[in-house]
Image (spheres, rainbow, N blue to C red):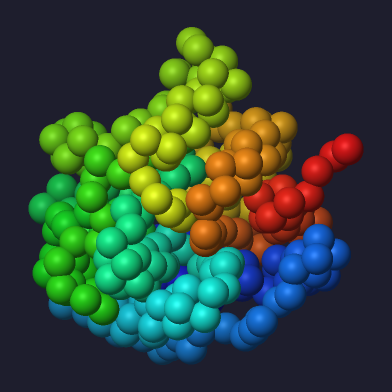
Amino acid sequence: MPLDFGGRRHGSDMGPSAMRLAGISDRIESLGHTVIRDKPVETEAQEYAEIGDNPKAKYLKPITEACTRLAEQVDLSVRNGEFPLILGGDHSIVLGSVAGLSSVYAEKGLRLGVLYVDAHGDFNTDQTSPTGNIHGECMAACAGYGLTQLVNLYKDGRKIDPENICYVGVRDLDSGEKKLMKEAGVTVFTVSDIDRQGFSDIVKKVKLFFKTHCDVVHISFDMDSLDPSIAPGTGVPVPGGLNYREALLLMEEMATLGTVKSMEIVEVNPILDVRNDTASMAVTLAARLLGETLY
């Protein structure tokens, strides 16, 4: 999903290609899985798109059009019994991912949960966003807050109960979104929580959360959740992030739940990367979730 309209710094539209070049298809197939389709969702070229007339929701039209196409493909993939692994792109693509998943699981009466691994909350609305970048409004819209064009993407209404959203690695929140996240009732494990409690205990709490709250789980993994010293190729780096071993452990432990049925990896920006290290790291994270073990 080479969508690159949601943020200020561009280049994440090349993230899917970087992960392909890092061997993600071969890595997945080496685990015994079959890659059904490996082609990009059609998106408008960033340099030709219109920013629009709403400064609090930049590139609203191309984002909603592209995410609607993504929702259609995710919906179809789940109905075909597949595991959607979506390569981004900026984090605004979660609008399409969760919309497609919600469409299927709501019909089946299954509770959808989202593990949101990110330095940021992405829980602003057009009323609170200091930038107007939609990648900072996308999760709020999935939970039913913000512009109607985002909330009603693909199907009308909110796509996920905010009480079924769990954050890990948060360390950079705007004041307005922090207030809204608390009111909405999302669960948040910040890096300070990790420091106080230890990462192993946090992972146990995350697993318990999804065992008690949800029937199926989607993982939305933003590479800026990792410390920029090890993952430089991302558009909004924030010091003090997860280390590589913590991220791998989280993916391995989530794999043991048996209820993780989809994943997206976003914000790989090759322009800012070094030796494609961030993309290679993303490939290993996906592999650990899909069954790769050290021993």
Total number of numbered labels? 0
Q: Describe residue 73's horizontal placement relative to residue 40 as left or right.
A: left
Q: Residue at x 52, y 61 (%)?
A: 262
Q: Is residue 223 above or below residue 196?
A: below
Q: Is residue 71 above or below residue 279?
A: below
Which quarter of the picture shows residue 252? top right
Q: Residue at x 43, y 88 (%)?
A: 44
* Image coords of residue 50 (percent x, y): 30, 84
- Direction front: furthest residue: 108
Nearer to us in this view, 288 or 128: 288
- Direction top: furthest residue: 196
Q: Is residue 131 in view from this perspective?
A: no
Q: Residue at x 21, y 76 (%)?
A: 155
Q: Is residue 36 above or below residue 176?
A: below
Q: Describe residue 158's horizontal placement relative to residue 294 as left or right.
A: left
Q: Describe residue 186's horizontal placement relative to residue 54 as left or right.
A: right
* Image coords of residue 91 (percent x, y): 43, 60
* Image coords of residue 49 (percent x, y): 36, 85
Nearer to us in this view, 109 or 260: 109
- Direction right: furthest residue: 295
Which quarter of the picture shows residue 172? top left
Q: Is residue 237 above or below residue 158?
A: above
Q: Residue at x 35, y 31 (%)?
A: 188
Q: Is residue 128 in view from this perspective?
A: yes
Q: Identify the image quadrant of the C terminus.
A: top right
Q: Describe residue 139's horizontal placement relative to residue 293 as left or right.
A: left
